[in-house]
Every structure is written in structure tokens, then in C-alpha cells.
Image (tube, helix red, strand yellow):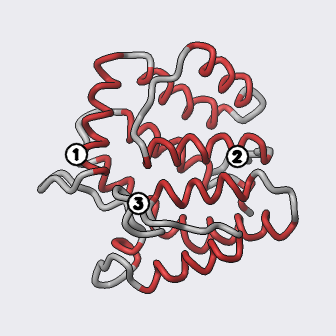
Amino acid sequence: MSESIRIVSEDAALVCDLLASAFLYGPSQLDKHAQDLWYRHLSRQTPAVRYAWGAVADILDGKEKLQQAIQDFQQCVEVPVPGRYVPPYASCYLNKPATLWGPSTFNVLEWYEQGGLEWQRSPNVVAPDHVGVEWAFLAELSELSSREALELRRVFIMDHVRKWFPAFMDRLKTTVQGSYYPALGDFGMVWIESEVWR
């Protein structure tokens, strides 16, 4: 990406939290007030960031598109529907062969321990390297101002998230029927390619 992107920690925490929620719980319609707050926060960012968010917000405005996004979440991310499921776990992309709870999962647990995150299994999230949990971890780190937290956030993005999130999103884009998750993935890509993580 040729354009330099400068992002403050407050904005990074908001974006990471949005991405975490969308992958953990599914899309949610943002009311006009919430969208205005997002535009206000992102107005100080580059055109690439504002454009990427605009694509997500446009989809959230349409009831039919939102319903399709919910269906895509349920069939492609949440429930392993044959032929539609795209595993949202890093180990399925980083380990050869693809293995849930492979070596990369234990690396993620070590990063979480360094950041003070205690992961607990839930019915819908069976491993700590779930894409939503990883974005939630980045949101927590972004709220901290210590040099150690910011460095851990940078390393986690550079050495882990960048190595698997693009492959996951490529697969998801070819599986979903709606445009919400592709737009959200593009929004996430803008952030992981930004210099806030460097």
C-alpha cells in the first residue's frame, strides 16, 4: 500500500473491537448515531480507511443485505455447514496439514499470556486462535498505552495475523453470498497493512 496510514490507538481499539464482534457474534446493524460516531472517529484517517469503512456502513444500512450477512455468518463462520464452512481458526491456515489446535495455536496462547489475556473455551469458539478472539486481543492491547503492549500488538500483527488473515478472507470471499464480510475483511486488511502496527 503506497499511502501512509496513521492511526491513533483509540481508533485502533474501536476498529479491532468491531471486527472481533462481527466474527464472534455476527453482523449487527449500527443505528445512525453509532455510524455518525464511526465517521467522526475515522474522519481524521486517510481516504483508504474512510472508503473501506464506507463500504461496510453502506451494507449495514440495507435490511436485505444485513439478513444475507447474518446468514453468511451462520453458515460460513459459526456453524460447520458442509460446503459452506470456512474455518475461522489460524491453525487451519498456518499448520501443514491444516490442524485445529496445531503448533500455531500454542504460539497464540503464549502471546495472550504475555498480554494478560485469559482465554476460555465457549460453545461457539473451540480454540484460542479464532479470528474474533484475535481481534478482541488486539482491541485490548490497543487500549493500553505501555510500550510493551504496543510492541506486543505490533509483533502479533506482523508475525501472526498478517500470515493467515488474508488467506482466511480470500476463502471467505469465495464462499459467502453477500458483500458484508468481504467489505469487512477489506476494512481489516487496511488496518493490518497500516503503519500503526510497525
Q: Residue placed at 50% from the left, 43% from the top? A: 21
Front: mark 2 or 3: 3
Report, in whole angstroms, how far the alpha carbon at label 2 lies from the one at label 1: 29 Å
Front: mark 2 or 1: 1
Q: Name the residue type under label 1.
A: Gln
Q: Residues within 10 Å of mark 2 (few under 14, many from 20)?
A: many
Where residue 75 is drawn, which disc sits there?
1
Report, in whole angstroms, how far the alpha carbon at label 2 lies from the one at label 3: 26 Å
Q: Position of residue 24 (x, y in %)?
A: 44, 48
Label 3 secondary element: loop
Give whichever of 64, 125 is nearer the camera. 125
Report, in whole angstroms, how far the alpha carbon at label 1 lies from the one at label 3: 18 Å
Q: Position of residue 18 (x, y in %)?
A: 56, 40
Disc 3 target residue: 122
Q: Residue placed at 63% from the left, 36% from the top? A: 49
**Which image quadrant is residue 147 in?**
bottom right
Disc with the residue nearer the chain's start (2 vs 1) = 2
